[in-house]
Amino acid sequence: MVQIKNPEQIAKMREAGLVVAAIHAATREAAVPGATTKDLDQVARKVLAEHDAKPNFLGYGGFPATICTSVNEVVVHGIPSDEVVLKDGDVISIDCGAIIDGWHGDAAYTAFVGSGHSPELVELSRVTEESMWAGIAAMKQGNRLVDVSRAIETYIRRQPKPGGGKYGIIEDYGGHGIGTEMHMDPHLLNYVDRRRGKGPKLVPGFCLAIEPMVSLGTPRTEVLSDDWTVITTDGTWSSHWEHSVALTEQGPLVLTAPDGGRAKLGELGITAAPDPLA
């Protein structure tokens, strides 16, 4: 069952989303050479406390931290640690969430640590982020879930990969519904699988966490012995971007973007829904 939200509930999710945006801003500033991923977790905890928000990652299925910190070949679910020290040239995905009055926000971004990153890595992150926005732009009344998947996959497939070959669209993980829980129906693939059909129709009140994960090589992953950390099977580096999005009568509202998605959606010819907290 897909949980459909009313405008008041979407406003609460917007509150949670803005806390997530604040965590992103603070951790991005702190993700410098010499910092540990545990340092970043402490930064996130401080932001949550400042906003009287609860973490939705900590304790989820036994997860031991407030955020996920996934470095280089780690695709997702990396556990913050004092032993993981960021180095110049690293790439890190930071995935985090927040709860306000029982309503969830969830988003992720890829950051470059220090300098000296290859054009191949910069392009990987750009392609992943832009494919997320292509998926967000497909959040239209009358579309179906598969249209979001198709928009993400189509964007990625159309981008030439520096040095040749194809990008790996991670197969085992994708987006999801979000609301009174962090992970809810429906599961959102980042590619089209015709065996799954078209999926539910998108209607006002439909909320999705849209999160493409893309590697420089394989689409396949494996989980390490900690039962959380997910890496690419060929060791290639990856990128992960995510926003929580609500479809309203006035169009999409990017709950975890500071401006509600107005600027980026405007570039794509789409008017973002009004911010209920403005």
Image (tube, rainbow, N blue to C red):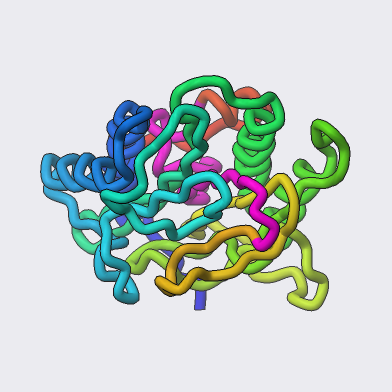
Residue at horizontal 41 percent and vertical 44 percent from the top: 255
Q: What is the residue that sits farthest to the right in this orientation?
A: 164
Q: What is the quadrant of the C terminus in the image?
A: top left
Q: Is residue 181 magenta?
A: no
- Position in image of residue 164 (x %, y %): 87, 37
- Position in image of residue 127 (x %, y %): 69, 36
- Position in image of residue 96 (x %, y %): 36, 50
Question: Horizontally, is 215 left or right of 253 in the view?
Answer: right
Residue situated in front as seen by the camera: 94 or 186: 94
Q: What is the residue that sits farthest to the front in this orientation?
A: 83
Question: Horizontally, is 108 left or right of 168 in the view?
Answer: left
> Does 157 sit above or below residue 87?
below
Bounds of the magenta span?
233-262
Q: Is residue 241 magenta?
A: yes
For the image, the number of numbered tags is 0
Residue at horizontal 77 percent and vertical 47 percent from the top: 167
Residue at horizontal 56 percent and vertical 21 percent from the top: 116
Residue situated in front as seen by the camera: 268 or 113: 113
Asked if residue 143 can be seen in this view, the reply is no
Question: Horizontally, is 243 left or right of 159 in the view?
Answer: left
Question: Horizontally, is 263 left or right of 219 in the view?
Answer: left
- Position in image of residue 160 (x %, y %): 84, 34
Residue at horizontal 24 percent and vertical 42 percent from the top: 39
Quarter of image, res 30: top left
Quarter of image, res 57: bottom left
Residue situated in front as seen by the camera: 184 or 220: 220
> Does 187 sit above or below residue 131?
below
Q: What is the residue that sits farthest to the top in this orientation?
A: 115
